Every structure is written in structure tokens, then in C-alpha cells.
Image (cartoon, rainbow, N blue to C red):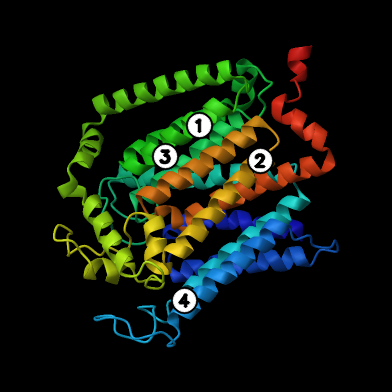
């Protein structure tokens, strides 16, 4: 039954990107069925289930957020000001239902990932990483077929946006690029997983993953996604810098090398990809990208209801109502292109502070629970990707991106907790000095 639960979770990782990122209601239904089947399978085992404390805290947080969304929708509040004159805070009183479904699915999936990782802490991390790479390979193949045959399709419908960009089966190039970035970091992790090995032995045993990382990097370039390129460079620099020897001289040396390499990559892109270089140059043209107008609009709306927000699924209506003169009114602004601002718009500033504080506490807990340098570097790189992505867009909230990141973080966390539980002293030693490669000793 454990194998069935693993299959359900791995299927979600691979299937979610194929289903337009998993954001459609029918896609969420399929993912929810797989999560439910996995939970039933693991519950059918003879061994008792051990729900870790952080999972319980996650459920408490989810239920509190759902409770606040329900409270926003109840007609128990004073009449709101025109044009939102109603006895409830939520502009869409029924929107809490979809929010509840999505949050419960996420919490249930993390619970399933935790239970599986506890059963196989020694092998589950590698299996999750390889599943993410498999999902990225499939998307890479679809995008390459699209480009070679001249198709402009998501394999679900004809493209109306991002024409000429690699998107795989995503409808958005940023989503495709973010998944490729996750796969690239996963490949780097498998290449650097045994820090005691010399570079020759690593190339012999895991050189293929380095080649895949290069292919994923090329796919990111072909997606023409600025945010994906940015998070890839940041994550790669962090991982390479932090995955090696822990002394400051070695860290400074690796940081200098990786920054120099990143500068070389940027220079090469400027010379060989003028269209992509022009897209980055457009960032200084605020009249083109309108991020400043979207930011100003969101801040105006937050000032109108700083404590309560406007309820779930209300961002599009809010952005239209509070739009600054420079904001393109013909665009459907379903997001302010900043998930933190979206949270403040929906739930209010106190809820945003609670969400941010919880996220930071979780990040520190994840980092401190790791027991070896590659694991810690992987966790830090993934957290950095999430932070940057959430600050410049909304795509990181897609199930296809949430799934691999969350499941991989939980897998690394449970492996670290298991190591600490077995031998705390050995775990501390492992974090500083991994077991030497026997081939080197002999």
C-alpha cells in the first residue's frame, strides 16, 4: 500500500504540468482524487500513522485562514462603502469554497508527503528529485516538438499569448520556466549529493544530470521568461555556493566563481539572444510593463481596507476599481503580480503578517532540520526561488509548481528529522563532514 501512495504522489508531480499547470477545476479534481487515494492507501497499512507536529500546525493554520474567509463572507458586518455596499466584507461571498478546497488539498498533499517520507526517509528524497526531473523532461520534449513542427499550442488549445515562446503544456511561459528552474536545481542536487567525491567520480556517476541541467537552462532561455531566468541564476548561485565545504574561504571562492559564471551567461545571452535582451531592457520602460501602476493600484486598495481585505478571488475587481490612470483597463488584472500584495488585498494586513511570519518560521525550521550541506543548499535554493517568484508574479501558486517544491522540501525535512532522531551527534557531524568516498580512500 505504501507503493500505491508513492505512485499517487509521483503521478501528481508529473501530471499537474500536463494539465495546464493544474489550475483548472477539473485538474484540481484529478489531483485531489490522487491525494485522497494516496491517503487511503497509506492509512490501510498495518503500522500506526505518526502525524508530525508541523503537519498539525499546518492544518491549524489552514483552518484558521478558511475560517477568516468564511467570516468575511457572512452578512454580519456594517454596510460597506459604495460601490461595495453589502453587509459582508467579501466581494464574492461564495469564493471561500474554492479557497477551502485548494487549501485542504494542499494540506492533505503535504500530509501524504510527510507520511510517505517517514516510511522511506533514505530513498524518498532521491525518488522525488528524479520524478521532478522526469516531469521537466516531458515538458522539454513537448516544447521542443512544438518548436520544431511550428505548432503554437499548449496541446489543449491554440496559443493566444506567448506565441513563439517555449511553454510546453503550460499556458504561461513563466510557469514553464519556473518548472524548468526547479528541475535544473534538482539536477544540480543529484550531481553534488555526495560532496566527498571528487569531480571526476561525480562526472562518471552523475554527469548525465549535469547535461540535463544544461538542457533545462536552454529551455528556460527559449521560454523568454525574465522571472525564470532570474530565479534560475539566483538558485544556482546559492546552491553551488552552499553545497561545498563550509569554511568561509571556500564559500567565498565558490561564490566568486558562480557569480563570474552567471555574468558570463548573461553576456552570452545578450550577444546571442537580442530579443531576450530587449525584454530585460523593457524593465526600465514602466509604461510598457505597468508593474509600477499595478503596485500603486494594489497599495491604494489596501489603504481602503487595511485590516479586513476584500475576500478571496476579489483581486481582479479591486484592481479595476482602484486602477491608476496609467493602468491598462483592457487587461484582466487577476493578480497584482505580487502574491504578498494579493494576500493583503484578499485577507488584510494582519493576515498578511501572520502568513509572512508563518512562512519565515517554516523556512528557518526547514533549514535547521537538514543534516548535510547539499540538502541545506537545496532547501535554501528552493526557498529563494519561492520568495523571488512570489514577489514578481503569481505563477508559483500553480499546483504544478507548488507540488514539486513542497513535496521535495518535506522529503528533505523528514530525512533530516529521521537522522536527528537516530543520532543527533552524528547528524551534527554529518552536516559538517560527510562520509568520505571509499574510492578516494583506496
Which labelled disc corresponds to residue 231? 3
Q: Please identify the quarter of the rendering in which residue 195 is found.
A: top right
Q: Is residue 300 above or below residue 86?
A: above
Q: Choose mark 2 or mark 3, whichever is in front.
A: 2
Query: In the rendered structure, which disc, 1 or 4, sits on the residue that comes first in sequence?
Result: 4
How far apart are the two marked residues, 2 and 3, measured between alpha carbons? 23 Å
Pointer 1 and pointer 4: residues touching (CB < 8 Å)? no
Instruction: Give the left or right position of residue 195, taking residue 277 as reference.
Output: right
Q: Name the N-terminal-most of marks 2 and 3.
A: 3
Instruction: Check disc 1 and report its element: helix, strand or loop.
Output: helix
Residue tagged 4:
96
Distance in Å between CA atoms under marks 4 and 2:
34 Å
> From the viewer's perspective, is 312 left or right of 372?
left
Q: Nearer the viewer, mark 2 or mark 1?
A: 2
Q: Residues within 10 Å of mark 1 (few under 14, many from 20)?
A: many
The residue located at (29%, 45%) in the rendering is 165
Which numbered disc flags the more N-terminal residue, 3 or 1?
3
**Spatial separation of the CA atoms under disc 3 and disc 1:** 10 Å
Query: From mark 1 to mark 4, how far is it between C-alphas?
Result: 38 Å
The residue beneath circle 2 is 368
Q: Residues within 10 Å of mark 3 (few under 14, many from 20)?
A: many
Dot 4 or dot 2: first in sequence order is 4
Residue, disc 1? 238
- Residue 377 location in percent, x, y? 58, 34
The CA span between labels 3 and 4 is 31 Å
Point out residue 348 in the picture as x, y percentages from the top left corner.
41, 66
Comparing marks 4 and 2, which lies closer to the viewer? Answer: 2
Q: Secondary structure at mark 4?
A: helix
| x then y, percent, for residue 92 | 37, 79
Amino acid at each position: 500500500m505504501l507503493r500505491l501512495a508513492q505512485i499517487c504522489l509521483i503521478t501528481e508531480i508529473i501530471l499537474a504540468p500536463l494539465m495546464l499547470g493544474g489550475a483548472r477545476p477539473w485538474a484540481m479534481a484529478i489531483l485531489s482524487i490522487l491525494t485522497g487515494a494516496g491517503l487511503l492507501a497509506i492509512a490501510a497499512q498495518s503500522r500506526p500513522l505518526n502525524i508530525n507536529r508541523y503537519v498539525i500546525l499546518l492544518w491549524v493554520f489552514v483552518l484558521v485562514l478558511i475560517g477568516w474567509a468564511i467570516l468575511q463572507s457572512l452578512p454580519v458586518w456594517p454596510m460597506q462603502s459604495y460601490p461595495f455596499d453589502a453587509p459582508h466584507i467579501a466581494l464574492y461571498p461564495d469564493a471561500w469554497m474554492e479557497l477551502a478546497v485548494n487549501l485542504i488539498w494542499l494540506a492533505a498533499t503535504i500530509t501524504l508527503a510527510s507520511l510517505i517520507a517517514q516510511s522511506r526517509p533514505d530513498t524518498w528524497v532521491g525518488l522525488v528529485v528524479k520524478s521532478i526531473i522526469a516531469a521537466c523532461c516531458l515538458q522539454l520534449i513537448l516544447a521542443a516538438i512544438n518548436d520544431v513542427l511550428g505548432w503554437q499550442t499548449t496541446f489543449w488549445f491554440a496559443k493566444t499569448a506567448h506565441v513563439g515562446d517555449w511553454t510546453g503544456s503550460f499556458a504561461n511561459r513563466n510557469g514553464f520556466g519556473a518548472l524548468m528552474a526547479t528541475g535544473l536545481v534538482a539536477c544540480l542536487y543529484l550531481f553534488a549529493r555526495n560532496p566527498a567525491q571528487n569531480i571526476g567520480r561525480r562526472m562518471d556517476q552523475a554527469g548525465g544530470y549535469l547535461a540535463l541541467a544544461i538542457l533545462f537552462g536552454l529551455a528556460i532561455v527559449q521560454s523568454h521568461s525574465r522571472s525564470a531566468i532570474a530565479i534560475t541564476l539566483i538558485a544556482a548561485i546559492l546552491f553551488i555556493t552552499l553545497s561545498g565545504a563550509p569554511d568561509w574561504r571556500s564559500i567565498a571562492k565558490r561564490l566568486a566563481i558562480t557569480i563570474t559564471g552567471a555574468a558570463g551567461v548573461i553576456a552570452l545571452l545578450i550577444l546571442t539572444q537580442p530579443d531576450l535582451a530587449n525584454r530585460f531592457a523593457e524593465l526600465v520602460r514602466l509604461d510598457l510593463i505597468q508593474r509600477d501602476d499595478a503596485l500603486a493600484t494594489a497599495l491604494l486598495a489596501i489603504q481602503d481596507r487595511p485590516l479586513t481585505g476584500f475576500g478571496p478571488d476579489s483581486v481582479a475587481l479591486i484592481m479595476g476599481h482602484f486602477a491608476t490612470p496609467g493602468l491598462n483597463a483592457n487587461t484582466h488584472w487577476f493578480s497584482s503580480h505580487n502574491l504578498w500584495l494579493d494576500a493583503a488585498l484578499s485577507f488584510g494586513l494582519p493576515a498578511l503578517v501572520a502568513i509572512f511570519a508563518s512562512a519565515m518560521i517554516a523556512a528557518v525550521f526547514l533549514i535547521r532540520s537538514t543534516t548535510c550541506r547539499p540538502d541545506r543548499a537545496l532547501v535554501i535554493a528552493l526557498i529563494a526561488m519561492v520568495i523571488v517568484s512570489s514577489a514578481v508574479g503569481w505563477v508559483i501558486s500553480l499546483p504544478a509548481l507548488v507540488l514539486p517544491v513542497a513535496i521535495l522540501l518535506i522529503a528533505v525535512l523528514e530525512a533530516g528529522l529521521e537522522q536527528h532522531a537516530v543520532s543527533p551527534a552524528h547528524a551534527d557531524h554529518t552536516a559538517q563532514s560527510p562520509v568520505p568516498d571509499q574510492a578516494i580512500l583506496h
